[in-house]
Image (tube, rainbow, N blue to C red):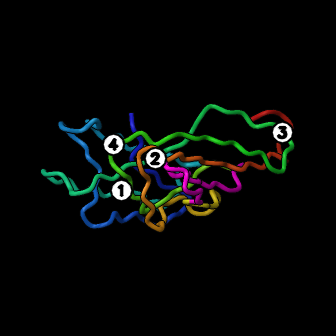
Amino acid sequence: GYIIYGWGRNAPQLQLPNGVGFSVGASSSIRYIVAQVHYLGARPPGEHSGVTLMLKPSPTPYVASLLAYAAGFSLPPAKKSFLVENECCYRGHQPLTTFAVRVHTHTLGRSVYMTRETWNHTGLETVVRGDPQLPQSFRPLKHTVIWPGDKLKVTCDFDTTCKTTQV
């Protein structure tokens, strides 16, 4: 399956730009939608979380997608800063234009940042830097074009000083 949206930590709603949508249905690799709600404890009284979907019979001009970096890794105990790096080379056929970002690391994460090395090696830039302990929502981002062949690297910084065993 694919994750196409995520929300948490009392964050505001995501509003996609005009003409942008997620492709779901018969002509898409995403055939159906499963919605899950996770609470850290019991559901708070008066909680009214929800998602509103607008379904259209024809495609939108631009397709939204989620670029997720997650890998199996472990964290050593008692470290003020432990970096976990994931990198890839974008192999799509069309350029991507960023418009929003959401960083997520659970409790031990302290910062997340993504850098991009251009396909022609003309430079390295920080695309995003975020605090995963802030409200977990997609926040508007300076539009950056990611080209086929660009190298993307996401670095997560974890603080495990409160742990006595490997996580």
The residue identified by callout 4 is: 93
Magenta segment boundaries in residue numbering: 108-126
Q: Position of residue 125 (x, y in %)?
A: 58, 59
Q: Position of residue 97 (x, y in %)?
A: 39, 58
Sequence-wise first label, 4 or 2: 2
Q: Amino acid at mark 2?
A: Leu
Q: Position of residue 78 (x, y in %)?
A: 87, 43
Q: Residues within 10 Å of mark 2 (few under 14, many from 20)?
A: few
Sequence-wise first label, 3 or 4: 3
Give the foreground label among 3 and 1: 3
Q: Position of residue 36 (x, y in %)?
A: 42, 43
The residue identified by callout 2 is: 67
The residue identified by callout 3 is: 77
Determine the main secondary structure of the stretch shown in magenta. Answer: strand
Sequence-wise first label, 2 or 1: 1
Sequence-wise first label, 3 or 1: 1
Instruction: Name above or below for residue 33 compared with residue 125.
Output: above
Left or right: where does residue 91 sit relative to residue 157?
left
The residue identified by callout 1 is: 51
Please tell me whether mark 4 sits on a helix, a strand or a loop: loop
